[in-house]
Amino acid sequence: MSSPDPQVDARDLFFQDDPDLIEVGIGELVIAESPKRLMTPALGSCVALVLYDPFARRGGLGHIMLPGPHNGIEDDSPGRFADYAVIELVRMLGERGSFRRRIQARIAGGAAMFRGESSVSTIGARNVAAVKRQLALMSIPVMAEDTGEAHARTLEITLETGETIVRSYRFGMRKL
Amino acid sequence: MRFNELTELQLDALRELGGIGSGHAATALSQLVNRPIRLEVPRIEVLKLSEVPRAFGGPEALVGAVYARMLGDISGGILFMARRDAVLALVDLMRGHEVGRTKSMGHEEEALLKHVSTILVAAYLAAVARMADLDALPSGPVLAFDMAGALLEAVVLEVGVEAAEAMLLWTSFVDEDKCVEAGLFFVPNPDSLAVILGRLGVL
């Protein structure tokens, strides 16, 4: 066995070696089941929405960027906007057999990354409010959240247990 | 204005604009730190939004960033960004110390970083404004230390991008000892991009 190349970042190795870890990018909605893990890195003003069905050990993760579009939706990717993404993620879970009443939500993100700039700081808060409003409309309970403030977050959920971890430079690892 | 509909001619014009802006910024920086600063060819990338967080050192890379809004005839943002060790090296150079002496960021170090960034951003914008014949002023800068991906994402959303792709016009700087590597991102609002292209005569 060859020794590991010191030039390679440990994180890269970690990703390559872990077929169970699925990364979700901005505007994407992904559904997976145990033993997979879902993660989305570097949330700023965006909000990560986790919908988890503990009975089926199935979950969905979205990385939502804005409350809604200004000029209507231009293409077929609803995952960017809270007004469409929440409903769509619930629908995708329903298609796989997760009833709405079994679904629990967890949310993270919605920070104001640049403090002191008033116009920057509202997007995150509006994202969180929009996601919560959509969840309330569908009677999906928010079990936990780590939102607002002024730091970036990375979220990861282990679908086998539903354990959700939020990482940040400010607070390290936090269980959600 | 959709970024993925830009023609090759328009992209070239923007690259030229970025080259002139960052050329002025690099000159200002090398005068400030009193050593030569090399400039890389400006990059213009039309990226899927999900790719934006990877543009600078990986989504979770710890960086220092200074953001200024553009005011005047065009709106949008300018972001100066460098990895934490490069920020510390920049502070050392500003103080006339050997690189490696500053180990952490306090109020004084943050003020220095803001100061440098303000000058870089002003130099960049002045050159862009002259070339495109429009008024563009930077707002007061705001500072953050955090994940590169989250900061880029926040800036792209802040300038009003809501399409599935974003345009990043950016240049990296590096000094002769390669201890200060930094990026300067020029992110116009999609409507302002049309104004800029019109002024450059390629709309």
Image: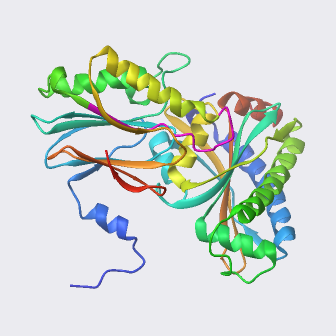
Residue B117 on the magenta segment = no
**Can residue A102 be seen here?**
yes
Query: Is B97 placed above or below A57 here?
Result: below
Q: Position of residue B24 (x, y in %)?
A: 84, 58
Q: Position of residue A106 (x, y in %)?
A: 31, 35
Q: Is residue B130 left or right of residue A107?
A: right
Q: Position of residue A145 (x, y in %)?
A: 36, 37
Please tell me which residue is depicted at 55% across the width and 45% down the height of the picture: A150
Give the tally of numbered discs.
0
Locate the N terminus of chain B by quadrant: top right
Residue A128 or residue B59, whichever sits in front: A128
Q: Position of residue A41 (x, y in %)?
A: 40, 49
Q: Which residues are magenta?
A: A105-119
Q: Is residue A101 left or right of residue B93?
A: left
Q: Is residue B4 left or right of residue A40?
A: right
Residue B37 or residue B6, whichever sits in front: B37
- Secondary structure character of the magenta stretch overall: loop
Residue A110 on the magenta segment = yes
Please tell me which residue is depicted at 14% across the width and 36% down the height of the picture: A54
> Which of the 4 image quarters holds residue A131?
top left
**Can residue A41 be seen here?**
no
